[in-house]
Amino acid sequence: MITVSKEQLDTVEYLLSQSAQGNHVLFDLDTVRRVFTIPTRPMNEQEAYAVEHHIEKLISMGSIDKQKAYIEVLPQEILYRVIKTYFNIVENSLFENISARH
């Protein structure tokens, strides 16, 4: 489980709202496209736990510039998992905020 402070929550809400509008501020668009065109296997429990720590670290950083710098040095495999997890969070956030469901 990822824990955030009030200040971090504001940042997370900003990032999620931007992503919901198609503005993926943290990630390079070409990288995002590449991540979702490559077939991957589901993460095992250990991999998911490791990604959770990277997401927590991203959230804890004070600025988007710092977050981008952190993302740029991640190994490709971890970056891809972080991106997929991030978009999963965005998708879940969108579903939670839909007022009318069919």
Image (spheres, rainbow, N blue to C red):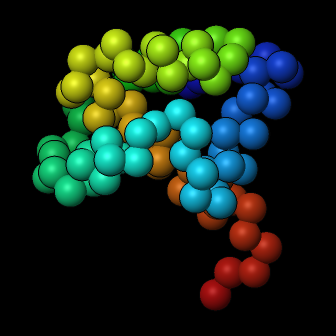
Where does residue 84 sit, x and y in percent of width and height?
37, 43
Q: In the image shown, does 53 or 28 lie closer to the viewer?
A: 28
Q: In the image shown, does 41 or 75 lie closer to the viewer?
A: 75
Q: In the image shown, does 95 or 16 lie closer to the viewer?
A: 16
Q: Quadrant of the C terminus?
A: bottom right
Residue 89 placement, left or right of 62: left
Q: Give me the residue at 60% from left, 51% from top.
A: 23
Residue 8 placement, left or right of 42: right
Where does residue 79 sit, x and y in percent of width and height?
32, 27
Q: Give me the residue at 16% from left, 51% from top.
A: 38
Where does residue 51 sit, x and y in percent of width and height?
38, 23
Q: Give me the residue at 31% from left, 33% from top.
A: 81
Q: In the image shown, does 16 or 21 lie closer to the viewer?
A: 21
Residue 86 placement, left or right of 98: left
Instruction: From this view, report whether residue 24 is shown above or below residue 101.
Output: above
Where does residue 67 sit, x and y in percent of width and height?
55, 19
Instruction: From this view, report whether residue 84 is shown above or below residue 73.
Output: below
Residue 12 placement, left or right of 10: left
Furthest residue in direction bottom, as rendered? 102
